[in-house]
Image (cartoon, helix red, strand yellow):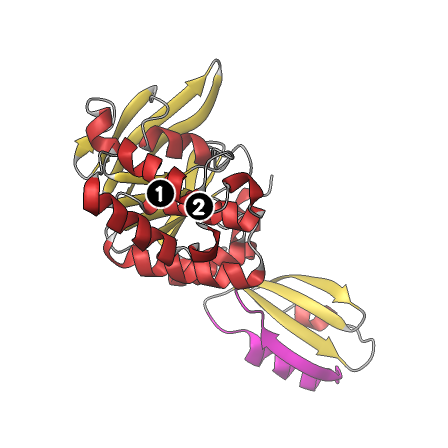
Amino acid sequence: MSVKIKNLTRTFGQQKAVNNISFEAHPGEILGFLGPNGAGKSTTMKIATGYLSPTEGTVEVCGIDVVKHPLKSRSKIGYLPESNPLYYEMYVHEYLRFAGKLHGLKGPYLSKRIHKVISLCGLEREQNKKIGQLSKGYKQRVGLAQAFIHDPEVLILDEPTTGLDPNQLIEIRQLIKTVGKDKTVIFSSHIMQEVQALCDRVIIIDQGTVLTDHPIDQLQYKADEQHILLETQFEADLSPIQEIDGVDQIEEISPLNYRIIAHSNQDLRYFIFKVCAQQNIPLVGLAQEKWSIEKTFQALTAH
């Protein structure tokens, strides 16, 4: 049930959209696949689904080579592309029946799967409407439903929460978590809060190259870097803090609020507090800045 990508390269003319990347996604794991626009995310996903062929390298889905056995590998995949192409003149239930038949489903089992995905995706009230009449959020749910219709072992979801309101985001997030318990899920998004809430592991790529691949709770923007927030009661000379071993930079966030950027394997707050006490710096607040995936993303992909 895993997805195995090895030495994958894809070129368009002189440009390498994907440059010799390798990784695996495992069953029961939701893998966040991140990168700025043009990083190679969608190209990688299209190769994994058999939509594009690789220039070099291999992709295996559930042990099946997607180039050598394209139809067999596609039968294992549920895919929601970023553009979410839909037939607007079809009714929701009609479209899902059509999608199921494309995967070879028929008879009572097809009807059972349609009922299941309509319920899973919260489409009960919308199932007898034409897709073109639906809001953007419900169109996205229809796209998710077609990805689930054949009960695939692997789900590849490119921007699946686009256009959803806050309540829908929570529902779809829970849906992906529920479905992902026994499937391999590759999830691409620009909404970092969604990635942090959903994913077990994160890969960040840029310019076609993997920059980091870690479990989300181990992802750090730099191995020994710490950001410490400091607030003073009134303006003061902070240059003594700059002399502390490991302190690299002091940024002013706003009047009386500062960010201390340091590299050290020790928690420097004790040393900062000690210097403030010795130098009569009117300290009001001192705290480690909470880590966020946005900081990691910005630190790795800023050029």
What's the residue type where badge 2 is placed?
Val
For the residue pair 62 and 164, the one nearer the viewer reads as 164
Q: Would you say residue 103 is visible in this rendering? A: yes
**x and y, in percent, of residue 152 in the image:** 25, 44
Earlier residue among tags 1 and 2: 2
Asked if 273 appears above or below 248 in the picture, the reply is below
**As shown in the figure, which amino acid type bears the numbered disc 1?**
Ala
Instruction: Check if residue 272 falls in the magenta segment.
Output: yes
* Number of numbered tags placed on the structure image: 2
Tell me the residue at 55%/69% (across/down): 290
Label 2: how many Cα within 10 Å (few below 14, some 14–19, many 20+): many
Position of residue 113 relative to residue 132, above or below, is below
**Which quadrant of the structure image shows residue 92?**
top left
Query: In the rendered image, which quarter is residue 211 located in?
Result: top left
Residue 270, numbered circle = none
Residue in the foreground of this view, choosing between 25 and 144: 144
Residue labelled with disc 2:
142
Q: Which quadrant holds the N terminus?
A: top left
Q: Which mark is residue 147?
A: 1
Q: Where does the magenta region start and end?
A: 266-291
Q: Is residue 200 magenta?
A: no
Front in this rendered view, residue 194 or 172: 172
* As drawn, 75 above or below 243: above
Q: Quadrant of the C terminus?
A: top right
